Amino acid sequence: MSMFFGFNKKKQWFIILSVCIALVLVFCFFPILRERGEEPLDEVAVTDSAEVEEIVYKYGIPVDNYDVHYGIVKPRQNLSHLLSEHGLSMRQIHDLNEKSKPVFDVRRIRSGQAYAVFFTKDSVASPRFFVYEEDPKAYVVFDLRGDYRVTRGQNSVEWRQQEVKGQVESSLWVAMQNCNTSPQLAVVLSHIFGWTIDFFGLQKQDEFRIIYEQEYVEDKPLQNFHVLAASFRASDSLYYAIPFVQDGEELYYNERGNSLEGAFLKAPLDFYRISSRFSNSRYHPVLKRYRAHHGVDYAAPTGTPVYAIGSGKVIAKAYQANGGGNYVKIKHNSIYTSTYMHLSRFAKGLKVGDMVQQKEVIGYVGSTGLSTGPHLDFRVYENGKPINPLTIKSQPKKPISPANRAAFTQVCDSLMQRLRSL
């Protein structure tokens, strides 16, 4: 019996000794094994749940573990310039380039974009990660440890709902600024109401009310908007824009359920001012005499995109030295044709015979031909005769169907009430 207990005691000591040896081996060799293998981006030791909340990540990397240097890519800088400045050899940069090929083309690194370099917090301060921001939402992580890894990532985005109400004093652009709202929202609004409201003819005291969502990344607002409802009082008329999904497509409708999108845009470019209107007797600034001007001149900076007001076929793309300069002519149907003149250049690849879509860029504002400054001379012909582009009629897309009428009415009434209460 005593021999049995003695044997068990020896066995217990043997087990304890084995466990101790195993623990020593783990603590001695685990760091070496980690150094040889691929380390994860989130290399954080967490001891309790309270610490989890305190960990701050940037690009999926725990920033407290590193000294982070932020910068902006300068003109003519590439990945080689950026990494060699931080101690990487040309051989290392070459290997990293090879690793990145299936994931990201390093030739796409552009000046003006943000980047970050993560350094170790020691006397050597070795770079461990290089992160390039493709845009505010997307980034590329170059892992400089071990055999190198290149991965893509996305910053988390948030859509925040906001409301704004204001009046036009000089322009819609300025009105948005006065309301502490991005002026880009004025462009979004002009696209929504572009078939029904002449935004070049706004009057003082015209009023807008908008309920919208704006995209944010890390509390920074992006110029991405989604209008949830809008109203615009212009020239004593009140217009509504209510979004509704029908047949899988979201369009904006008025309170009667008619689509705001029509066959023709009210204007072929965004904002800026009308410098000359349709007239049978206008004083020509170059020829110094009165003659007919069967179009509308839009003063705008050189390079401003010019859109096709409606879908159609390009029937002319040419240059007229003593007249319209670079011009494009589009036949929309058997009745209407539109012409765009004094362009600085044409849209890339545009040619006669092409079918273009409404709102497609066909060229850019310039001052070619007989012109005193950058502007667009825009003309519309009805059955071959010039008409005032500002008075062109536009048939809307199909209205809310009878099957969707009840659902639309419920949504519309609710949103109109919210707009009135702003």
Image (cartoon, rainbow, N blue to C red):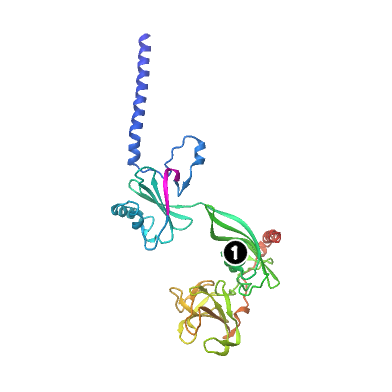
- Residue at image coords 52%, 41%: 53
Q: Is residue 237 left or right of residue 190?
A: right
Residue drawn at the location 51% of the way across and 51% of the way down:
156
Report the residue at 59% width, 69% height from top: 190
**Residue at the extreme front of the image, as rendered:** 123
Q: Residue furthest left?
A: 91
| Label 1 Cα neighbours within 10 Å, binned few <14 / some 14-19 / many ≥20 | some
> Does residue 347 show up magenta in the picture?
no
Give the residues in magenta. 62-70
Q: Secondary structure at mark 1?
A: helix
Q: Which residue type carries mark 1?
A: Gln
Secondary structure, magenta segment, majority class? strand
Tell me the quarter of the picture where residue 109 sits. bottom left
Location of the C terminus (image quadrant) = bottom right
- Image label count: 1
Q: Is residue 285 above or below residue 165?
A: below
Residue 131 position in % (x across, y down): 41, 52
Residue 229, position in %: x, y?
64, 61
Q: Which residue is mark 1?
A: 177
Q: Split into 4 quadrants, where in the image is the N terminus?
A: top left
Instruction: Give residue 155's position: percent from left, percent from top.
Output: 49, 52
Q: Is residue 63 above or below residue 203?
A: above
Q: Is residue 46 left or right of residue 225?
A: left
**350 or 123: nearer the viewer:** 123
Q: Is residue 80 above or below residue 189?
A: above
